Amino acid sequence: MAQMNMIQALNSAMDIKLGQDPSVVVLGEDVGFFGGVFRVTDGLQRKYGESRVMDTPIAEGGIIAAAIGMAVNGLRPVAEIQFADYIYPGYDQIVSELARIRYRSAGEFKAPVTVRTPCGGGIRGGQTHSQSPEALFAHVAGLRVVMPSNPHDAKGLLIAAIEDDDPVIYFEPKRIYNGPFDGDPAKPAVPWSTHPKGEVPEGHFTVPIGKAEIARSGNDLTIVTYGTMVHVSDAAAKGLGLDAEIIDVRTMVPLDADTICASVARTGRCVIVHEATRFAGFGAELSATLQENCFWNLEAPILRVAGWDTPYPHAFEWEYFPGQARVAKALKAVMEAS
Amino acid sequence: MAQMNMIQALNSAMDIKLGQDPSVVVLGEDVGFFGGVFRVTDGLQRKYGESRVMDTPIAEGGIIAAAIGMAVNGLRPVAEIQFADYIYPGYDQIVSELARIRYRSAGEFKAPVTVRTPCGGGIRGGQTHSQSPEALFAHVAGLRVVMPSNPHDAKGLLIAAIEDDDPVIYFEPKRIYNGPFDGDPAKPAVPWSTHPKGEVPEGHFTVPIGKAEIARSGNDLTIVTYGTMVHVSDAAAKGLGLDAEIIDVRTMVPLDADTICASVARTGRCVIVHEATRFAGFGAELSATLQENCFWNLEAPILRVAGWDTPYPHAFEWEYFPGQARVAKALKAVMEAS
Amino acid sequence: MVKKSRLHVPKTPARPGDAPDFSYLKLSPAGEIARPDAGSPWSGIRFLAEGLVRVLDDQHRAVGPWHPHLDPGELQIGLRHMLLTRAFDDRMQRIQRSGKISFYIRSYGEEAVSVAMAMALRPTDMLFPSYRNQGLHVVRGRPILDLMCQCLSNTRDMCKGRQLPVMYHWREGNIFSISGNLATQFPQAVGWAMAAAIKGEDNLAVSWIGEGSSAAADFHHALLFASVYRAPVILCVVNNQWAISTFQGHAGGERETFAARGPGYGIAGVRVDGNDFLAVHAVTQWAAERARTGAGPTLIEHVTYRAAAHSTSDDAARYRPKDDYQKFPLGDPVERLKNHLIALGEWSDARHQALVAELDEHVAGSWKEAVSFGTLTGGPSLDPGLMFQDVFAEMPEHLRRQEAEMRAELAGK
Amino acid sequence: MVKKSRLHVPKTPARPGDAPDFSYLKLSPAGEIARPDAGSPWSGIRFLAEGLVRVLDDQHRAVGPWHPHLDPGELQIGLRHMLLTRAFDDRMQRIQRSGKISFYIRSYGEEAVSVAMAMALRPTDMLFPSYRNQGLHVVRGRPILDLMCQCLSNTRDMCKGRQLPVMYHWREGNIFSISGNLATQFPQAVGWAMAAAIKGEDNLAVSWIGEGSSAAADFHHALLFASVYRAPVILCVVNNQWAISTFQGHAGGERETFAARGPGYGIAGVRVDGNDFLAVHAVTQWAAERARTGAGPTLIEHVTYRAAAHSTSDDAARYRPKDDYQKFPLGDPVERLKNHLIALGEWSDARHQALVAELDEHVAGSWKEAVSFGTLTGGPSLDPGLMFQDVFAEMPEHLRRQEAEMRAELAGK
Ligand SMILES: Cc1ncc(C[n+]2csc(CCOP(=O)(O)OP(=O)(O)O)c2C)c(N)n1
Ligand SMILES: Cc1ncc(C[n+]2csc(CCOP(=O)(O)OP(=O)(O)O)c2C)c(N)n1
Ligand SMILES: [Mg+2]
Ligand SMILES: [Mg+2]
């Protein structure tokens, strides 16, 4: 075991797969010589060469398309989109192609591409360095969609994604690259070394895609969340002294509905938390699924806590971002409802 | 009043606006000389000239971008995307630009573009002529999203969209262009002239964006739906002899939550029906909103009826498409639940 | 508007009722264009993007430096493939009209593009076709029975019912799956070629799009990535003058050839008479040698004509003169190869008629067999449960549940 | 992989530790490139895309057919705008380092591109800038106070707190809003120009992107639509050699000039010394005349150098030689114009120093005023309720509710 932050954990996952499997290649803007604007691919080009770790033109559509072609020719490309906010020029190739090549060719062709992309706010990045567009991929049949909340899962899920025969859209909540974040920007930054999930095996291991994790067990209510919000929710629940069960969804598609529903059926109360804008966000799917499956067990309405339904507003980041106060308010409302 | 099918109604809306307002222009693939592959723009180029009704290159991203630029220069472009399945190459310009120009310029610039696009299945169109991607736009702050279910609303909503100062994504359920469709492909086609909503005023009128319509009043339960599924749901409810209230959502954004919640609060039972794939579809938002607002009134879980979570499968269209049987099953389940 | 519009709108030379007008087409006499070494730096050979490489002259002779000197036997095979493609197309068109398949797209008038190219490539070269390249399957030996079964979505459908007619694929034959979204295959082919280069292999990728589709972003990505990584790929724009109802001027053809985009991106561009089997073959060989030796990618513009309507859903008489194809200056690819073989003394009208009859019979026989595997309206049919397979490599829980729901629904439960 | 990779990877001429190497840059001597009539058909003037239009020679004289013969007074104004832009940039860079703004992007070394172009255009021409065109605002008279307030997201912020620093806009000044998504403005500018043509007006649209951004799909759409509709637009690729850490070869510059993409699409392409104020001005006038008279769009490649790091978040020393800019063969645009004015006898070192001092003072004064409207950390601040406005023209019900929720949250309720 080693202490790693998320950047190191992600780097380690790619390093291991590049070393083990000659068909793995990494491509993206500034990922080669420079090692990526967040340094997630640091040192990989030096180690594996310019044909395995490639700087690309600034063309997200071209990056995804080239990765698909490479995958069809037997490679396992890991494509980086520099910020999730810039994934839209590649959207057609992802939705119309990547997601459907296996299906439309009845399994004769496949495209095991992993698309890594940093998402989320909290870094003063403004409209185009802060978005959380996971719902826009979760609705598309044929894509696996993943978002880890800590270094351990980041590494295990990324190795699993690269080894997966299906395409995976892999969101990295960049606010917690260097340490967990409880939503309070005024507090000093905490490194991952202070967190149990900052302990990461050095070698190969996987975290299975499609399994949620009970990040904390509890009986009062269930919080269903993922990414940065796992930590914000935890802090909010602790702040209220609630015995909350916190479920880290980890994989949006395929969703581990069983784990989530079992918890809510038991606690009878649920709050869903995500950073993305609320309207038609992924929280809606979680809420709808839970309501369908746990209706008779529910003792209070399921509430959603999310970013407001506006573009990401630079100067009002902390009024926009779902922090402990917003989560706590929902937790109280759900606990008090009757 | 005149008898119109949806194609004629849409054509009439554009004809009126092109005639009234010199800033209105129409552009898209094959919309000019040919009048569109569904003939929705038939005759408009002849009447208004090649500079007002423009054939474009096959580049959806370019079409949206050009429309934005035109709108910034004072025009009111109505851009056609030939099939909603082909809207993704324009997704970046829609999500990152069209939706946010007013916001990011603090109101100094605006882009009143209407994007018309035929959506939905039931025409043996296979994977790329059948999709219903409305949820992928409803999640994006800054876009109005509309889908009519009949000629009357089609015309009134399209005029409202063209006159609206915000961008509108306007989905046209192509299965009902020529007549209402109750989901049974074996039945002979019915023309709009047999339907009260086939009566359409000849001149200028609007249907307000942001208002749902109670397509049928009832007391047993509420069906919340839109587009083609309004008719399928109606037939399913009639088939079961249920006194269902059917709400035609018409506008997804901004959603008329008041009308919808008021109905469900009254009936206590609700089924949501749409054609799009179920997972993280727009039905999830409807379900979550209703559950939050009407929890204490609900007598049964809210159920969703939708397309299955697969790409649109050509040969299995009628097993995929939510028909009366699937709707009826959910209606029964919701009525029997206790 | 108060003032008169100053917007330039591309002219369409002839609409219904007008006389066909091909005066806009820049032609070169057969044999006129030089044939540079395949390894030439692209910047010295820009003339290839402006002229028109042609081998067959008006007397049906093969002339000039691009003459590929193929065996008559090979030419006869080429003719056969083109005729089979056409016989297949014609039959499927009629079948669609009779309601037995839902949709069809013919390659009528463009058969040489697919057939001559596929014959000039290696079987291990990977092909990324558009929907108008059925000739590739024919050359690579896919039984037309299989193509018919796909169009029927029957129990032998290679797509398992999931795709519209004509959206074939063939892994074993190295032919990629066709998307309904135009042009997406173009940059994918470049990625495939990059992978071949990364693996140190010398197979090529070859892809085709229509001139209308060259407007798509994918076209740009393909040319750019091909240029930056010097990928071993051949990118083809099939300029058949029309994109449904829209004339090629609307795709940029009014200003420059489509081949000229290549040099703009720093890659070789070649404009070829797409109805001249020999010229297409020769240009393909040249581009393949170029790519295989690491000299870089080539953009080929095939000048041809979409003799049929866009698809069975289209009526071309609404937007162009009925006799347009009859007046197309580059003629018909089948006729031209046939006449060349006759001029060589290697073919005759009688042999031609016999071959056509043989192929028609083969097509008819295949159709008979195909329907035995089911049609849209009768016979054996695919299990609708197939719709849930291959969404993912393994079926996840939610699809298993949906499949069960669907089966209950079908069982009337 | 078993075999050795055959993939070509573009070379970066010099990395940290290497000596700067600009041998890849194709230069032309000042005065060498002919100046065709602005109405010339594009196909006859391809040489403009390959050479390098330059006016200022090594002796600081203006020479050759592109000499724009500007008044010394106008040149002095140009120098002043460039110096103000630079003084502003320098100050904001230091302010960012001190933590008072979160982020900044300088245009250091590229000031002539924005300043000379804006001066050669009409105020009614619409500008669609990238994030490195602050000189446009300076020329059009936007007080730098306003730009500073934007960077501060304070109560006078034109963006009402909604945008990152440097993402300015100015409706009155006809300067469009900047997107964080690269290149999106390029085809929008073409649409704007099409609308101008439709309305029968003779205003132009002008847009700028970096050479790295020319890889984006938007670049292709812009060129294509500009070509098809002959839109009155000037499209500029600012080739400053770098896209963050990535050398211009990765955007296709290894094979061909960026200007050459123009002729590929059938539009005029001109490659100009972007650090030569006179050359940039002359080329802009030429392209503007061309567009205004209906002769068509122009793609201009400005050859320049990104003298600063990409942004304040970047450290260029990690990926290129520290002294790269000092060795850049086209020098510094400010120095070159200054020396030309001195050579003309219209300027002196003393006047220069005085001007620099005056501008520094102006910038310092503006900053003092700007902070009085609030900073990130103190003073008056914007109402966060502004985040809910302008999502739509009128605030819909759900946003009204969310605003109320947010206000309750802020009030600790
Ligand atoms: C992205 C996308 N946009 C639009 C369409 C609709 N469409 C199908 S074929 C076609 C015309 C294509 O013309 P061209 O590329 O010239 O090919 P051709 O049919 O002439 O072979 C269009 C517009 C589509 N399939 N995909
Ligand atoms: C669509 C998109 N992809 C990626 C980025 C991230 N990014 C910001 S600036 C930049 C480099 C741009 O280089 P260039 O176009 O040459 O402009 P320059 O910074 O040199 O002026 C990149 C990759 C972005 N902003 N938008
Ligand atoms: Mg065509
Ligand atoms: Mg640059």
Image (cartoon, coloured by chain):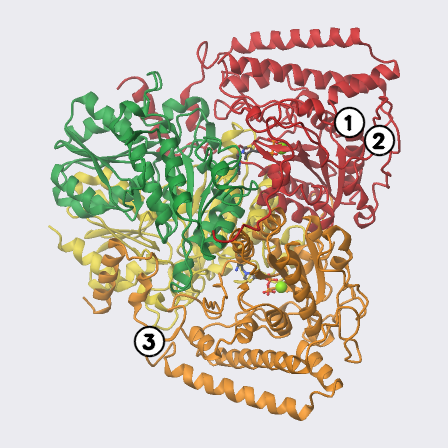
Chain colours: A yellow, B green, C red, D orange
Percent coordinates x, y for residue A100 in the rendering: 49, 35
Indicate which disc residue C30 carries. 2
* Residue C370 position in % (x across, y down): 55, 11
Q: Are marks 2 and 1 in contact (CB under 8 Å)?
A: yes
Above or below — where is D187 with respect to C237? Answer: below
Q: Of label 2 and label 1, which has the lower sequence position?
A: 2
Question: What chain is tagged by disc 2?
Answer: C
- Kindly indicate whether the residues beneath marks 2 and 3 are on one polypeptide chain: no
Residue located 72% across and 75% down the image:
D69
| Chain of residue at mark 1 | C
Mark 3 or mark 1, which is nearer to you? 1
Q: Is residue B29 left or right of residue C300?
A: left
- Crowding at mark 1 (Cα within 10 Å: few <14, some 14-19, many 20+): many
User: Which image quadrant: the C terminus of chain B?
Assistant: top left
Q: Nearer the viewer, residue C4 or D342?
A: C4
Q: Nearer the viewer, mark 2 or mark 1?
A: 2
Residue D328 visible in the current orientation? yes
Residue type beneath disc 3: Ser
> Label 2 is placed on what type of residue?
Ala
Left or right for A174, reference A214: right
Q: Nearer the viewer, mark 2 or mark 3?
A: 2
- Residue A155, compared with residue C148, is above or below; it is below
| Mark 3 crowd level (few <14, some 14–19, many ≥20, 10 Å Cα) | some
Residue D381: mark in rendering: 3
Disc 2 from disc 3: Cα separation: 75 Å
- Which residue is label 1 attached to? C276
The part of the image, by quadrant, that contains residue A293 is top left
